[in-house]
Image (cartoon, grey):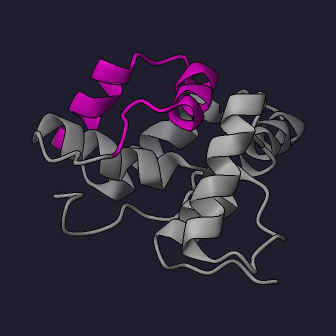
Amino acid sequence: MDLSRAYPRSPKERMAGLVQLARMIDKARAFKENQLSDYIYPCPLDKIILSFLRIDSDVFAMKAMDCGDDEISAWSEEMLKDKKSAELVFINDQILERRPDSEDRLKYFYETRDKIDPSRTDVNTWVDLLDLEEGRLPPK
C-alpha cells in the first residue's frame, strides 16, 4: 500500500473486535514496502494494540505482508480468545478517547485541526483528527 497515494483505513474501523488493527495492517504493509510517506509505524496508537496483542512491530509487519486481512483477523481473534470483553472495551476506549497529553501536543493538535477546519471545535481526540485529516469527517 502506497500511503503517499491512499489513506490507511480509519482508526475506528474494527477488526477482530479491535479498533486501529485494520489501519495498523495498512501502515505495516506500507512500512515493509517503503511506502509509508508521512505516516508512522508503529505510532503510539499502534503500540497500544501491539502491546495488547503482545507482539513485536516487526513481527506484525511481516505477518501483514504474508497474510490477507481475513487471516490476520482470525490470527488476532485466536490471540484474543482468553481476553475478557471488558478488556477489549478498555483497549478500544484507550484508542478512541486518546487526547493530546501535553501542552506541545495540544498546541500541535489545535493547529492541525484549525488548518483543516477551524469550525470543528468538536474534534478533540486523535482518531477524530485522523479521520478529519483523511476526509472522513467525523459527525458533529
Residue 56: image quadrant is top left
Q: Residue at x 49, y 79 (%)?
A: 135
Left/right placement of residue 31 relative to residue 23 reads: left
Query: In the rendered view, does 136 fall on the left or right side of 82?
Result: left
Q: Which residue is at the far right?
A: 86
Give the image location of residue 46, x and y in percent.
51, 34
Q: Nearer the viewer, residue 138 or 70?
A: 138
Residue lying at the far left in this picture: please name it. 33
Q: Is residue 99 depicted above or below 120 in this figure?
A: above
Viewer-closest of 92 and 113:
113
Magenta: main secondary structure: helix
Percent across and percent down for residue 104 are 68, 31
18 horizontally vs 78: left or right: right
Image quarter in which the N terminus is found: bottom left
Magenta stretch? 39-65
Q: Which residue shows up at 74% across the image and 41% down it?
A: 106
Quarter holding residue 53: top right
| Residue 110 position in % (x across, y down) | 70, 54
120 or 1: nearer the eye?
Answer: 120
Q: Residue 17: in sight, yes or no?
A: no
* Residue 91 position within the rendered picture, expressed as x and y whole percent measured from the top left: 76, 36
Quarter-of-image position of residue 69: bottom left
